[in-house]
Image (spheres, rainbow, N blue to C red):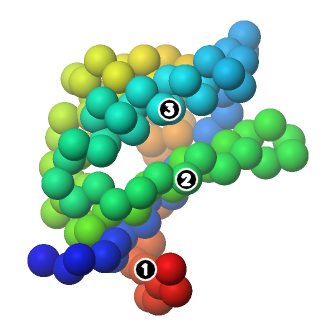
Amino acid sequence: MPDRATLLEWTPFRAAPGVSDTHLLAAADRLTREFLAPLPGYVRRFLLRQDDGSYVDCIAWRSAKDHAVAMETAMTHPAAQDFFACLEDPEAAGAAMRHFTIAADWT
């Protein structure tokens, strides 16, 4: 198993109406601490905010298999459910999710 991330999950989304940046960031932090961080294969996460108020959630995984395990349980985890409730359209975000193989990493 690689010791570095090999897969990047990239998911663009907008916050739901009425969800403040503070609320969204708190839900994202909880998702990271309670769900992602304990998972084998989770490496790191970036939440990017664009000038238009939209976001991109970037999660680095050690392998596609590790990502698949996370996806199997994400919909039923309370922290994940709370984060998804902050999204304007969780289904559209899921459909827009893309996966990239990390070709090089200079960290």
Query: Is residue 26 or residue 89 the one in the foreground?
Result: 26
Q: Which residue is mark 3?
A: 28
Residue plotted at (29% across, 18% down): 78
Query: Is residue 93 or residue 44 the one in the foreground?
Result: 44
Residue 12, position in %: x, y? 60, 47
> In the rendered structure, which disc, 1 or 2, sits on the residue that comes first in sequence?
2
Q: Residues within 10 Å of mark 3 (few under 14, many from 20)?
A: many
Q: Which residue is mark 1?
A: 102
Q: Look at the picture and state if 89 lies above or below 68.
A: above
Badge 3 marks a residue whose secondary structure is helix
Badge 2 marks a residue whose secondary structure is strand
Mark linked to residue 46: 2
Mark linked to residue 89: none
Q: Does residue 99 appear in the picture of this structure? A: no
Residue 61, position in %: x, y? 32, 63
Residue 81, position in %: x, y? 37, 20
Residue plotted at (22% across, 60% down): 41
Query: In the rendered image, which quarter contains the N terminus?
Result: bottom left
Separation of disc 1 and disc 3 at Cα? 23 Å
Q: Quadrant of residue 72?
A: top left
> In the rendered structure, which disc, 2 or 3, sits on the residue that comes first in sequence?
3
Q: Quadrant of residue 82?
A: top left
Residue plotted at (31% across, 42% down): 36
Q: Amino acid at mark 3?
A: Ala
Q: Name the side, left or right, on which 98 lies relative to 4.
A: right
Q: Amino acid at mark 1?
A: Ile
Q: Name the side, left or right, on which 102 lies relative to 13.
A: left
Q: Look at the picture and state if 28 lies above or below 79.
A: below
Question: Which residue reaches farthest top?
Answer: 18
